[in-house]
Image (cartoon, rainbow, N blue to C red):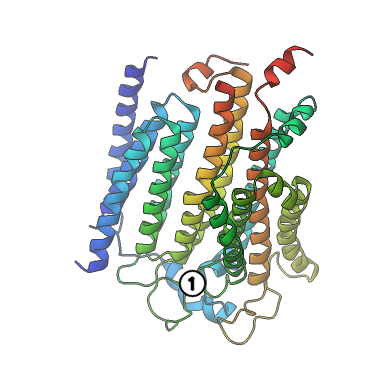
Amino acid sequence: MTSTEALQIVVLLLVAAGAPVVVLIRQPVRQVVALSGYGLMLAILFLVFQAPDVTLSELTVGAVVLPILLLLALAKVRERDK
Amino acid sequence: MSVFPYLIVVWILAVGLYGIVTSHHLIHQIMCLIVVQSSTYVLLLAVGYRRGAAAPYFFDIPVHTPAVDPVVQALALTDVVVEAAVTALLLAFAIQAQKRFGTLDPHELVQFKG
Amino acid sequence: MSDVTRRWVFFAAIAGFAAFYLWGLTGLPGFGNYPGPYGLIINKIAVEETKATGVVSAVNFEYRGFDTVGEEFILFMAATGVSVVLRHLRGERERPGLEQGLGADEPATSDAVRQAALVFVGPVLLVGWWLASHAQTSPSGGFQGGVVLATAFIMIYLSGGLLTFRRISPIDLTDAVEAAGAGGFAAVGMAALFMSLPYLYNYLPLGIKPGAVSSSGTIALISFFVGVEVAAAFVLIVGEMLEQTLLRQGEPAREDTR
């Protein structure tokens, strides 16, 4: 087994461990942070699968844009709860 | 190793679906939907991978080196960006639901029909 | 259906799905043994045909350009949908609340955050522009470049506050820029029709040296338009959501006293 394959297995296991973490956190604000970390793990996985374009997209979208949108929506929704 | 990534794909899909089914907060559901979508990206890239091949960019490597499949990468790449915009639309609907019905619990929202 | 029942129904359904999926897995050629013809063919011919060394972008904007038009219009529609839903929520009655909210104090941001965001705005803009214009040579392209450009505008919001953000990217201007990007992509394809070529045919000069920036014809042009459109779409979405946070908590009362 070459080193690339070992790296791929390790990152796949990290991603598989990250998904339940994102799902099982029930408070949305904390889940946003977990989602951001999960996006970073996915970006590393795409890089190890020899896909740098998809890595760039996933990094910018998953770690920056999606958390901003989610936090803005949460701020708007919580304001009404008060 | 030959089927390991595909097992991970179905695991992520199942975990995400479990989150959607047992959720009590619309925005938590939307984040679980993001997890489900990510499983499809992993599946696409795993299908196109070639053992020992390089990325399909021939800027600094000779043109006939073995490279992974670029078609599935093109699919996954536009997918990632477009799903972010669709998630924004879903969030706008969630804000609208909160304003009209006062609640974000999907089990309660089901009762408001028509 | 109670929570526990829902859980068990889900487990039964996912077990059935997983059984079919695993049955299908046995027919696959396995991870790493790529059999299919398309990837091999495209890797062989793409560089000579289009003089673009970034084969993924060549597939995206040339071989599979029609699909990309469709996906870009999905993005356009999603941004339009967000605008429609959130502007309807704002409505005309709530405009006094909006103007009032602008003058009030925003929550204080720490100076470190503001300084750091300000320092990064320039480099992020540059990187985004580089990504959007180099689709044909290296791992970059309109979609990624557009998102990075939008991130630069978000950093302006982080460093300057909402008023600065609104002045830099007023919603009407962002609307127009987004429409120009989407329309520009479609127009590049239509121009091919006017030359009696198939839609989205690559009619610009292809260049001599593969990998130079001014090569590969319409791929570079389309990537530029896509970058502009994606950036404007995300700035519009974030701008609409930020406007929502301006509305004060007193609106439900205002609706009752009509």
- Depth order, front residue of B104/C106: C106
- Residue B32 seen in the current view: no
Chain containing the residue with disc 1: C
Q: Is A60 left or right of C255, judged from the image as shown?
A: left
- Depth order, front residue of C72/C253: C253
Residue at image position (34%, 63%) is A48
Residue at image position (39%, 48%) is A37
- Depth order, front residue of B5/C36: B5
Disc 1 element: helix
- Residue B27 seen in the current view: yes
Q: Quadrant of residue C132?
A: bottom right
Q: Residue furthest bottom?
A: C208
Pointer 1: residues within 10 angstroms few (<14), some, or many (20+)? many
**Residue B31, placed above or below residue C208:** above
Q: Give the residue at mark 1.
A: C42
* Image label count: 1
Residue at image position (31%, 42%) is B11
Image x and y of residue C171, in percent: 75, 45
